[in-house]
Amino acid sequence: MRELKIWIECMRLRTLPVSLSGVVIACALAWWAHRFAAVPAMLCLAFALLAQVASNFANEYYDFKHGADKVGRVGPRRGVTEGDIRPRTLLIATFSTLAAAGIVGCCLIPYGGWWLLPVGVLIGVGALAYSTGPYPLSYHGLGELAVFFFFGVIPVTLTYYVQALRFDPLVLLASMSTGLLGVNVLLVNNYRDVDDDREAGKRTSVVIFGREPAAAAYLINGYVAMCLLTPLWVRAALGLAVPVWTLLAPVIYLSLHTVSWWQLRHRDGSALNPLLGSTARNMLIFTLLLSVCLVL
């Protein structure tokens, strides 16, 4: 039981709403457009979750190798750093999970075409390049940009495409909105770890620009994410294709988001750990609320 708990911690379940949200919102938009297809939707969901778990495994392994994680760190316990998981075992788990994601991704080719193969390879490389390689993205202030594309733009647009076989401007806006909400989850993580990251030479955006700009970016991202979906809110206000109570989704999200931002500004150290989960929770709540409105 203890070993299972260690691996669950390693998977970082509280961050999985980031990949889950992109697929769910894309499926809701496909349903709304009368294009929903269950099989490719489920394949996209499995691929997204496996790819994120592989990325989380890789991040833990390579942060350990680079000395970015230390015993007794402020953030959640890291199994390989604390000696609970052998480094080689975690490395094998990383590439095994990534291979599983690749197999699932190949199953999407009959639905979307062979051009999905290089895109899948790019996603796999991105999952590793975030933490390792000649220019690790998370070590050079590019982690947020990677999250924006790999957990926002790419999964939302591609999940919609393999069902509808077309792209849509509103879907692109939704993908950018989802990407910004995902970026906030990473910002909380880097905000909490800024001192450890600076000491380890890990130049995250928070290390580069400081905590105050990071907190401001966190707040702004949430509001910009809602503004990007203005075409949908206008339709709701006018009663066109979506019910007027769809407007509750951004209102509820922004209320939760503003509270989370206030907590970010007034907490430090391990007290920030729950905020990582609540930021991901806010993202998932908004996704589910909006999806219910679109489906109904």
Image: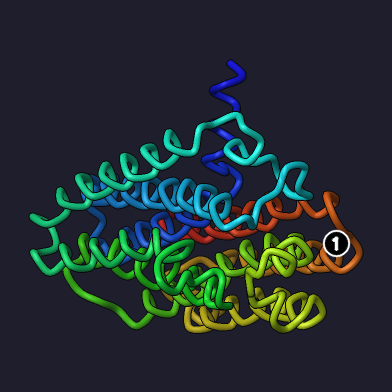
Q: Residue 22, located in which quarter of the rendered image?
A: bottom left
Residue at the spot 27% in from the left edge and 67% down from the top edge: 122
Left or right, residue 269 beside residue 254: right
Q: Nearer the viewer, residue 290 or 25?
A: 25
**Label 1 residue SS:** helix
The x and y percentages for residue 125 are 32, 63
User: In the rendered view, would you say 264 is above or below 60?
Assistant: below
User: In the rendered view, would you say 66 is above or below 240?
Assistant: above
Q: Amino acid at mark 1?
A: Gln
Left or right, residue 206 beside residue 265: left
Left or right, residue 70 beside residue 14: right
User: In the rendered view, would you say 104 is above or below 36?
Assistant: above
Q: Residue 135, located in which quarter of the rendered image?
A: bottom left
Residue at the spot 53% in from the left edge and 71% down from the top edge: 143
Left or right, residue 49 beside residue 292: left
The x and y percentages for residue 225 are 58, 77
The residue where tag 1 is placed is 263
The x and y percentages for residue 10 are 55, 39
The x and y percentages for residue 115 are 12, 69
